[in-house]
Amino acid sequence: MNLAGKKIVLGLTGGIACYKAAELARGLVKAGASVQVVMTEASRHFITPVTMQALSGKPVYTDQWDSRISNNMAHIDLSRDADAILIAPCSADFMRKLVHGAADDLLSTLCLARPATVPLLVAPAMNVEMWENPATQRNAEQLRKDGVSLLGPVAGDQACGETGLGRMMEPEQLLEDLSAFFHPKLLAGKKVMITAGPTFEPIDPVRGITNLSSGKMGFAIARAARAAGAEVTLVSGPTALPRPSSVTLLPVTTAREMHDAVMSQIAAQDLFIAVAAVADWRVASVSGQKIKKQEGQIPSLQFEQNPDILAAVAALPSPPYCVGFAAESEDLLAHGAAKREKKHIPLLVGNIGHQTFGKDDNELVLFDEQGHHRLPRASKDALAQTLIKEIAQRIYRKPSA
Ligand code: C5P
């Protein structure tokens, strides 16, 4: 997440999700943003300005008549200075106020006074019945028509004890969506499928064979593709990673399940990025019961070949643009170029060294028809963004005459 230098007005309205706004403010600051918190009266029943000041590092504004602003035009000063205004949580009532252009407190007035160039993002948070009420739905629709970005709400357990749509998105997801908002939309309108993580090949109901892939690189690429405006489907083996925001996640376990999930939706894709560390072999006959330990007997396993998902996609009559990954323990340069040719793919990404599994950074080398070039060591998030730029350039590059 990178929001370095971004000036964000964070507005809080009345709702129990205000407790999440504290973590959101902290995350924004951590991501490099400068955060100016503005709170409505209702929000101050849930959380105090003291908390928000401590976390944002700046005094909070609550009142249109705040004497700290010398010209007494807080609504103008605060809205002119912002790169974005984020209302989180945004109550049903505040949505209504935005729809009607209300200006009866500082936050609604500064939203109304914001120049057209300052984006407004709102994260609705309310009881499920309030969200589903036709009045709120009409307001949500009107806000979208007015160019306001709605982040969530999401479904789940609610503080009131009910379950359903209306929960505010988690701070981590809101940060992801906000930082995506500022990214150039290099893949706008493109459908991208990404495989990630390891696969798990069962031996019996309690044992199996897997590998050390954490899924971090594939998930980072999914986030970067989505930030670049793509519609992303992430087919992932078992990982411990949080689901990326606004991405369709298809969880799978085995290589064959991954193959089937990919093939079921590949026809619609413009781009396929195979990052998963797919098991090359599976156990030929999986035991239906736990294999019992018997004195003096060591079981032996027979293996069968798993499908090569990337090669299968690349061999389709009209394949999407295919990108493969390679983790070689030695002589990456020779193996990488050969692997690209063998798999019939335009771009192959090599991990330099095979110690990248589970780490937060990486060093890559790209192989294409013109040769290879390195992407120096950086965080997986930064590399994922660079990779998406590299891919976008290639997708839109005119074929040479
Ligand atoms: O042949 P190798 O396994 O080294 O190729 C790695 C690339 O192929 C990766 O992009 C990986 O996701 C993909 N792959 C696959 N299905 C397999 C094996 C590898 O999609 N069964």
Image (spheres, grey):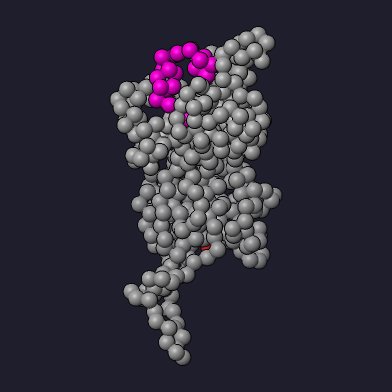
- What residue do we see at 62% from left, 52% from top? 360
- What residue do we see at 38% from left, 34% from top? 166
Q: Quadrant of the C terminus?
A: top right
User: Can you give x and y, in whole percent of width and height, for residue 53 in the image?
Assistant: 63, 29
Q: Please indicate whether residue 117 sits to the left or right of residue 201 in the image.
A: right
Q: Please indicate whether residue 322 sits to the left or right of residue 140 in the image.
A: right
- What residue do we see at 63% from left, 19% from top? 81
- Furthest residue in direction top, as rendered: 71
- Furthest residue in direction bottom, as rendered: 296
User: Can you give x and y, in whole percent of width and height, for residue 97 in the image?
Assistant: 43, 17
Foreground of the two, 74 or 49:
49
The image quadrant that residue 332 belongs to is bottom right
- What residue do we see at 32% from left, 22% from top? 135
Q: Is residue 295 visible?
A: yes
Foreground of the two, 43 or 260:
43
Residue 209 vertical position relative to residue 364 in the rendered view, above or below: below
**Count of numbered marks:** 0
* Residue 247 falls within the magenta-colored stretch: no
Q: Quadrant of the N terminus?
A: top right
In the image, which residues are magenta?
Answer: 89-110
Magenta residues: mostly which secondary structure?
Answer: helix
User: Can you give x and y, in whole percent of width and height, for residue 39 in the image?
Assistant: 54, 23
The image quadrant that residue 304 belongs to is bottom left
* Residue 99 falls within the magenta-colored stretch: yes
User: Can you give x and y, in whole percent of width and height, for residue 149 in the image?
Assistant: 46, 27
Q: Please indicate whether residue 305 sits to the left or right of residue 80 in the image.
A: left
Foreground of the two, 340 or 226:
226
- Furthest residue in direction right, as rendered: 376
Q: Is residue 371 visible?
A: no
Residue 131 vertical position relative to residue 350 in the rendered view, above or below: above
